[in-house]
Image (cartoon, rainbow, N blue to C red):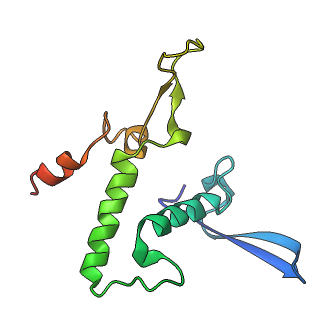
């Protein structure tokens, strides 16, 4: 298994009709892509989320960034928010099978909690007051 794997999906069309879909393994092999991970929808969804949240990444807009350092900072802030602060519905786990009206039904998680980087959801105060080494 490779430290990273790279797969390219090549779609051929003829007059707006799909003809073939070919998978090209640039780095790695089919073993490196377990389950349903041999598609681009995960990456495309993440790209769309970032494009929605960072105006500099928007298409056909007048928003642009004059300095690369500002762009890097806004990207790091958004990635912190995405991975450590926001809960993701796809990562929640069901607590119990009870259907009581006002009872908590799910344990919500951030991507960092799912990867066991943190045990709890972080907040902006943590980011702004944590000492930088």
Q: Position of residue 54 (x, y in %)?
A: 41, 69
Q: Which of 33 and 85 is in front in this view?
A: 85
118 in relation to 41, above or below = above
Along the horizontal axis of the image, is 125 left or right of 5? left
Residue at 87% x, 73% y is 18
71 in relation to 99, above or below = below
Q: Position of residue 21 (x, y in %)?
A: 81, 69
Residue at 43% x, 64% y is 53
Quarter of the image for residue 64 reads: bottom left
Along the horizontal axis of the image, is 57 left or right of 12? left
Quarter of the image for residue 115 reads: top left
The mark tally for this picture is: 0
121 in relation to 15, above or below = above
Q: In the rendered view of the protein, which quadrant contains the C terminus?
A: bottom left
Q: In the rendered view of the protein, which quadrant contains the N terminus?
A: bottom right
Q: Position of residue 79 (x, y in %)?
A: 36, 59
Residue at 64% x, 53% y is 37
Residue at 41% x, 42% y is 110
Q: Which of 17 and 99 is in front in this view?
A: 99
Q: Position of residue 30 (x, y in %)?
A: 68, 57
């Amino acid at each position: 298994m490779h430290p990273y794997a790279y797969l390219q999906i090549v779609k051929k069309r003829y007059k707006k009709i799909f003809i073939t879909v070919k998978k090209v393994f640039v780095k790695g092999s089919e073993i490196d892509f377990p389950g349903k991970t041999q598609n681009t929808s995960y990456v495309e969804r993440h790209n769309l989320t970032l494009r929605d949240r960072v105006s500099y990444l928007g298409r056909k807009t007048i928003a642009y960034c004059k300095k690369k350092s500002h762009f890097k900072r806004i990207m790091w802030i958004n990635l912190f928010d995405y991975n450590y602060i926001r809960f993701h519905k796809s990562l929640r786990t069901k607590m119990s099978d009870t259907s009581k009206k006002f009872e908590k039904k799910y344990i919500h998680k951030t991507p960092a909690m799912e990867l066991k980087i943190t045990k709890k959801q972080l907040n902006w105060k943590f980011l702004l007051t944590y000492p930088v080494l």
